[in-house]
Image: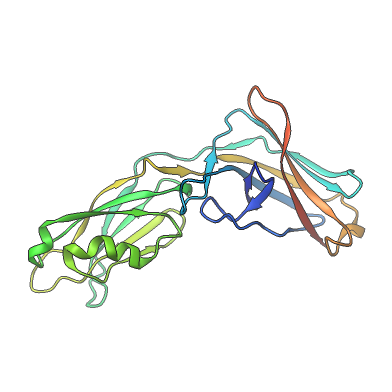
Amino acid sequence: MDLHISTEEQIAIQSGWNGDAHSDITARIGDNWAVNAFFYSRNRRHRDRPYDLIHYAAAGVVANLIDFNGNVLATANLATELVPAVTAPVVTRVVPGTATVGEYDRITLPSPPGSGSLSVAMRGGTASLRGGTSATARIVPTVTAPRQAAAAFASMLGAPWTMEFVSGVIVDVHGTIVTGGGTTAFVQSVDVSDLQYLYGWSGVLNLAAVDPSFAGQPDVYPVWLVIMLTPSGGAAAAAAKIPVRLLI
């Protein structure tokens, strides 16, 4: 399970672009529970990026499953650093060869992003007089709507423009289909200087020794996952306390 943790609020959020909190998380007694923890701080300046990823290099991270009396039911050191690749993105021209899709550009990022945005500069083809111009759009992964891309790029070749997030690392940019022997628009450059790639900590929480009587509704048998974080040179503190629903 990937846990995106707001250290200020000590909660698990959906992602760096979505601050909605998880009401609880579910785990099964007896499993080896793989936990990946990514830490965030609130960013009050960017509406589309409410949280910034924090890089805690050389930190100590411990995951404890505790009951309502504070007893530790299971514990794990998240000792493996998740270090993202930070090479330049790759832009590939895709030519499906159909009458309805046309050519488009695929941007492949080196690692799944965790927060921030990327800027895509498009250059027009020769389908119209506007084709020689270029435009740039700021793209927020998983948030940017096709109409936002259309608004930025329509001055070149005209709408419709679409942008599709095929996966966490692939972005497809589709432009209007060019007819009459013209050339299609293309991605001129991709700027990822504002993009933050996922950097966190990973470990396995063994739930084999957890008493099956804890399974059930969290309000009846309250159990929490507590993430303890010790930054390099700092003191240990609780980064998150998340309700857990245990199943058998």
Residue at 38% x, 39% y: name it: 87
- Quarter of the figure with residue 153: bottom left
Q: Nearer the viewer, residue 178 or 237?
A: 237
Q: Farthest front residue?
A: 45
Q: Is residue 88 above or below residue 246?
A: above
Question: What percent of the width, then of the height, locates residue 28?
Answer: 78, 59
Question: What percent of the width, then of the height, locates residue 193?
Answer: 37, 40
Position of 76 with respect to 191 (left or right) is right
Position of 119 with respect to 239 (left or right) is left
Which quadrant, please, contains the C terminus? bottom right
- Quarter of the figure with residue 101: bottom left
Q: Nearer the viewer, residue 148 or 31?
A: 148
Residue at 56% x, 53% y: name it: 15
Q: Nearer the viewer, residue 8 or 157?
A: 8
Q: Is residue 67 above or below residue 233?
A: below
Residue at 35% x, 67% y: name it: 146
Question: What percent of the width, then of the height, locates residue 234?
Answer: 67, 25
Q: Is residue 28 above or below residue 57?
A: below
Scheme of image coloration: rainbow
Question: What percent of the width, then of the height, locates residue 33?
Answer: 72, 51
Position of 67 with respect to 240 (left or right) is right
Position of 138 with respect to 217 (left or right) is left
How many marks on residues? 0
Residue at 8% x, 70% y: name it: 181
Q: Farthest bottom residue?
A: 99
